């Protein structure tokens, strides 16, 4: 769930003033609490749908109120606000944040092309030095068994699938429940024909506006939710004072046991409706990165929590004095609203339901983008709807698919009961996944005793397991839908992830050596054409097989050749100064380089012009640093001991050559090329100018980094070659893959490959994801035999 008001990347160590905290708390109402605040619309209605009856003794309504109160207290207030929100990943929250933390503190990641250099990222920080931290039995056990790595990823994907399923169900039940208030203002015949069409129109309108982005109307989200919370509180206080001032006694846990004793099996089944009061709790953690712990805590404890309790108590107070309903469907929110204010409350409820739906829709876009960055989802087009506000994205294919499914759910179920059963299972499954992952974080990342983590798991896990069982028993009454959606999404994610890993292993086994590339010119009469060739590959070392296939069929490549690897690392963000790893492939005269571009799971890929400009700047900086390094006698001695085909340079060499780590293939350069206007004086430094575009020049300065005149001459020549190549144009060379099975492969593997090829043909290509201009694209056919 992404910010609608515009917050950039937050530092986990940043402390806000009380004014900033108050402002963030106010803004969080429209983003974080929209879904949670509208739950009173359907909780009682779902609970009393069929399983239990509202009797004259009031034991049922008081028991449900007691369950709602203690559920809101134990799960959102204690579990999330007090504990889970502290398990942030550099200020970010959510399922992938927990998984990222675990992967950094224990070797359980299944991501390919990992490097030691990734651990030097600022956002990769560990609380303790892994070499001095004593390994627990659980950590050793997790790292030893590879099947547990897969099981952990599957658990994360299950949580992800249920969040996506919630993106289908929450808008449907929220808007439907809000519109269903018309039943008290229209006749029964008109009501039956009005609620479904109006709900579908509102949902279609909501999804149709997604491509415009929410930053234009986002400023009204918080006022709407604030007005809704005040409205619920006022209605609750009115009903408590007017109908039953002693309803507070039902908060006693004794009423829960009394409720279960009387209703037995049906009371247990009704817990599937009660758990809907927690809907939206996960948003507090998922949206942590856009606000702050103190802001979310302040908003929930001082406003949202009291307003929800008053709303539920008010409904219970009214129902405790009214029992003459013609059907249980009337046991809901609107029955307790006075006739004089019913229409204004109805309009406000619809607006609040739209805000709550918007939050989960944005969250679905965000989590799919994160899944895609971890190679767990087919490639989709991600559109940034705001240039100034970080995190506002729109995915066209997912948006229209969600709209179709939302309308289908509304038309197919037609009642709150089935929608509530489906939504409840999705919500409680995500919470169970969060509880399990948080227990691992407590043990592996916080280094707390295993008994403490086990206590957290057993206490909150048992509560959620009780609700999960009550929700699962409603399988035939709507709970089948999130399970079906999860199975389909899981199949897609596992097929894509498994085949992607196998393709990487195939590339790793079939890469060619640097010697082969250097000797190729003599064998084939290789021609170097003007321009820069960017060869995209998943490999972080060696020459990929698709490039060898290209040059053996067409013996020519560009004068400046760059092997580009765009990879994801288990951190939320990678700072721009640390994004690029630059290395040299072959001797300086070959003009071949390696560039590894690192993104976090919440990062967004740059547009091609920005990427190309930054890449040229990074290459120029690397050339100067490499020359400086070669001028050092100590460095020359070390280079003689290394493979001559690959030169590695990092910015830390400028301070301490002896501390350089040669274990990794490349090292990053944090320095940047100076950017000056064309008429800026250059002093005594030698300079080269590269035409970046029609409005800007990039100047390369050969400064004091280069010690000797001879080295300065080589640097000048290399920068001139880079400048000429940039002016000649850039070509993007990508592999166009087709996957086949080896003879004798299993049926499951064959089906997996067939599924992958189907997804690859019908989803976006890598050129769309990498934002490669079609005029500069060159695709090389590649057959993978797995």
Image (cartoon, rainbow, N blue to C red):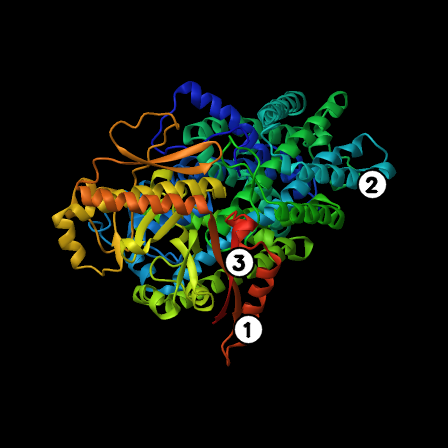
Secondary structure type for disc 3: helix
Q: Position of residue 521 (x, y in %)?
A: 35, 65
Position in image of residue 510 (x %, y %):
39, 69
The disc, 2 or 1, on the residue closer to the chain's N-terminal end is 2
Q: Return the residue nearer the eye: 15 or 346.
A: 15
Of mark 2 and mark 3, the one earlier in the sequence is: 2
The residue pinned by badge 1 equals: 750
Above or below: residue 683 compared with residue 719: above
Q: Position of residue 364 (x, y in %)?
A: 57, 44
Seen at 70% across and 28% down, the residue is 336
Q: Is residue 780 left or right of residue 672?
A: right
Farthest residue toward the top?
Answer: 19
Which residue is drawn at the image coordinates 52% and 49% (left, top)?
772
User: Which residue does the numbered mark 3 point to in the structure image?
Assistant: 493
Q: Position of residue 640 (x, y in %)?
A: 16, 58
Labels 2 and 1 touching (C-beta < 8 A): no
Does residue 454 appear anywhere in the picture?
no
Q: Nearer the viewer, residue 452 or 34?
A: 34
Tell me: 194 left or right of 118.
right
Determine which residue is flagged by label 2.
Answer: 192
Q: Alpha carbon of mark 2 to alpha carbon of mark 1: how far?
A: 49 Å
Say which of marks 2 and 1 sits in front. Answer: 1
Compare residues 516 and 7 and report the one nearer the observer. 516
């Amino acid at each position: 769930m992404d910010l609608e008001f515009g917050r950039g990347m937050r530092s986990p160590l940043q402390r806000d003033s009380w004014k900033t905290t108050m402002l963030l708390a106010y803004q969080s109402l429209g983003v974080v609490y929209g879904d949670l605040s509208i739950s009173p619309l359907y909780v009682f209605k779902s609970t009393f749908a069929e399983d239990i009856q509202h009797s004259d003794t009031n034991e049922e309504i008081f028991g449900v109120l007691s369950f709602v109160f203690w559920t809101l207290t134990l799960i959102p207030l204690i579990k999330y606000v007090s504990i889970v929100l502290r398990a942030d990943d550099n200020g970010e929250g959510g399922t992938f944040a927990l998984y990222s933390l675990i992967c950094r503190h224990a070797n359980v990641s299944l991501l390919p092309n990992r490097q030691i250099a990734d651990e030097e990222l600022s956002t990769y920080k560990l609380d303790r030095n892994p070499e001095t931290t004593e390994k627990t039995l659980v950590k050793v056990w997790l790292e030893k068994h590879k099947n547990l790595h897969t099981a952990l990823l599957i658990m994360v994907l299950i949580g992800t699938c249920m969040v996506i399923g919630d993106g289908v169900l929450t808008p449907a039940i929220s808007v439907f429940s809000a519109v269903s208030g018309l039943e008290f203002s229209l006749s029964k015949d008109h009501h039956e024909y009005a609620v479904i069409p109006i709900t579908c129109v509102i949902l279609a309108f909501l999804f149709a506006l997604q491509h415009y982005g929410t930053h234009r109307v986002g400023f009204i989200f918080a006022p709407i939710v604030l007005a809704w919370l005040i409205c619920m509180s006022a209605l609750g206080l009115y009903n408590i004072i007017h109908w039953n001032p002693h309803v507070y006694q039902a908060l006693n846990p004794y009423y829960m046991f009394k409720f279960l004793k009387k209703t037995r099996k049906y009371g247990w089944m009704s817990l599937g409706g009660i758990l809907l009061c927690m809907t939206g709790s996960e948003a507090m953690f998922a949206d942590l990165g856009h606000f702050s712990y103190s802001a979310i805590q302040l908003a929930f404890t001082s406003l949202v929590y009291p307003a929800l309790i008053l709303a539920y108590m008010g409904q219970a107070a009214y129902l405790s004095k009214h029992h003459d309903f013609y059907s249980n469907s009337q046991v809901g929110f609107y029955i307790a609203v006075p006739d004089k204010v019913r229409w204004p409350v109805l309009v406000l409820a619809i607006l609040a339901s739209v805000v709550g739906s918007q939050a989960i829709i944005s969250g679905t876009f965000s989590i799919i983008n994160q899944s895609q960055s971890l190679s767990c989802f087919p490639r989709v087009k991600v559109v940034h709807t705001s240039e100034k506000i970080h995190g506002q994205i729109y995915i066209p294919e997912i948006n229209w698919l969600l709209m179709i499914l939302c309308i289908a759910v509304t038309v197919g179920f037609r009642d709150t009961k089935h929608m509530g059963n489906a939504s409840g299972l999705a919500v409680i499954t995500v919470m169970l996944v969060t509880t399990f992952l948080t227990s691992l974080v407590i043990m592996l990342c916080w280094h707390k005793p295993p008994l403490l983590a086990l206590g957290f798991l057993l206490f909150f896990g048992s509560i959620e397991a009780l609700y999960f069982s009550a929700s699962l028993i409603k399988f035939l009454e709507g709970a089948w839908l999130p399970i079906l959606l999860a199975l389909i999404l899981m199949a897609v994610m596992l097929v894509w992830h498994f085949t992607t890993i196998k393709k990487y292993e195939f590339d790793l086994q079939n890469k060619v050596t640097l010697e082969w590339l250097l000797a190729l010119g003599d064998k084939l009469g290789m021609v170097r054409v003007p321009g820069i060739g960017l060869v995209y590959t998943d490999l972080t070392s060696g020459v990929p097989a698709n490039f060898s296939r290209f040059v053996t069929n067409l013996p020519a490549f560009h004068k400046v050749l760059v092997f580009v690897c765009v990879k994801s690392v288990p951190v939320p963000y990678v700072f721009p100064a640390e994004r690029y790893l630059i290395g040299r492939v072959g001797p300086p005269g070959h003009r071949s380089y390696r560039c590894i571009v690192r993104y976090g799971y919440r990062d967004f890929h740059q547009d091609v012009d920005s990427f190309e400009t930054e890449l040229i700047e990074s290459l120029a900086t690397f050339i100067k640093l490499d020359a400086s390094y070669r001028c050092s006698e100590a460095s020359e001695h070390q280079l003689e001991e290394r493979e001559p085909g690959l030169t590695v340079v990092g910015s830390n060499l400028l301070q301490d050559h002896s501390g350089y780590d040669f274990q990794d293939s490349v090292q990053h350069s944090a320095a940047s090329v100076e950017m000056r206007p064309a008429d800026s004086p250059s002093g005594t430094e030698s300079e080269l100018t590269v035409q970046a575009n029609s409005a800007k020049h990039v100047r390369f300065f050969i400064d004091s980094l280069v010690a000797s005149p001879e080295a300065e001459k080589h640097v000048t020549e290399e920068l001139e070659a880079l400048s000429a190549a940039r002016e000649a144009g850039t070509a993007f060379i990508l592999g166009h893959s087709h996957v086949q099975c080896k003879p004798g492969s299993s049926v499951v593997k064959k089906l997996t490959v067939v599924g992958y090829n189907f997804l690859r043909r019908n989803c976006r290509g890598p050129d769309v994801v990498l934002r490669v201009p079609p005029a500069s694209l060159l695709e090389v056919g590649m057959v993978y035999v797995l």
